[in-house]
């Protein structure tokens, strides 16, 4: 996780567990200023939020499908083409999430990834520590406003 010093603006690389209890307290590596960040870490997303989001996704013609993959519970919500059965989606989700997690271990400031398979673009975004959303699209980027919807999942309105 990258946090910037409130005093000098220097970038500080911190381990992901530095945000214990919703707070990150650290001394700047440049000026030794003690920084105290407060942040809420999302831990859950309701099934209603998942269904509401999948409903939004259906309205974009360039999106082929989407699903939520929970590392503990597997697929928890899907709007994928009928040609794919649940086992196919779980296999796809497992591989994509594992790739994302490996990349995140190497570069903790990653917040999403895009994988291209044939002419399909698979967008993977972490929602919580164990929940991910995968969106399959024919476009190189997500439709306007959709990323904002993803980032808003699990946050109180």
Image: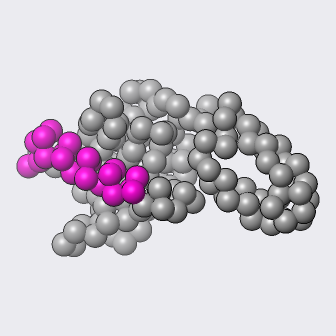
Q: Quadrant of the C terminus?
A: top right
Residue 3 is inside the magenta segment: no
| Residue 50 sits above or below residue 103 on the image | above
Q: Quadrant of the N terminus?
A: bottom right
Bounds of the magenta segment: 83-102
Q: Quadrant of residue 108?
A: bottom right
Q: Position of residue 111 (x, y in %)?
A: 51, 56
Q: Is residue 23 above or below residue 47?
A: below
**In the displayed structure image, the side of residue 83 where residue 121 appears, left or right:** right
Q: Of residues 126 and 32, which is closer to you in this image?
A: 32
List x then y, in percent, for residue 93: 26, 48
Q: Kindly tell me whether residue 13 is visible in this rendering.
A: yes
Left of 42 or right of it: where is 4?
A: right
In the image: residue 68, left or right of residue 109: left
Residue at the image point whose x is 90% and y is 63% from the top: 31
Q: Is residue 87 left or right of residue 106?
A: left
Q: Position of residue 125 (x, y in %)?
A: 43, 52
In-front residue for pair 136/21:
21
Residue at screen point 90% across, 54% down: 33
Residue toward you, 154 or 90: 90
Q: How many marks?
A: 0
* Residue 98 included in the magenta stretch of the image: yes
Residue ID at (22%, 72%) = 119
Colouring rule applied to residues: one colour
Q: Is residue 145 visible?
A: no
Q: Which residue is rendered at x = 37% and y = 72% of the image?
A: 140
State the image coordinates of residue 20 (x, y, percent, origin top left).
Answer: 66, 35
């Amino acid at each position: 996780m990258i946090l910037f010093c409130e005093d000098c603006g220097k970038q500080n690389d911190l381990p992901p567990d530095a945000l214990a209890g919703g707070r990150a307290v650290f001394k700047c590596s440049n000026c030794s200023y003690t920084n105290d960040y407060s942040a809420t870490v999302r831990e859950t997303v309701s099934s209603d939020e998942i269904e509401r989001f999948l409903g939004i996704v259906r309205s974009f013609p360039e999106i082929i499908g989407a699903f939520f993959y929970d590392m503990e519970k597997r697929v928890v919500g899907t709007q994928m083409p009928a040609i794919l059965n649940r086992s196919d989606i779980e296999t796809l989700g497992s591989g994509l999430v594992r790739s994302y997690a490996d990349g995140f271990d190497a570069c903790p400031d990653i917040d999403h990834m895009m994988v291209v398979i044939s002419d399909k673009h698979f967008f993977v975004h972490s929602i919580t520590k164990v929940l991910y959303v995968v969106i399959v699209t024919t476009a190189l980027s997500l439709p306007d406003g959709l990323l904002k919807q993803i980032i808003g999942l699990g946050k109180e309105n």
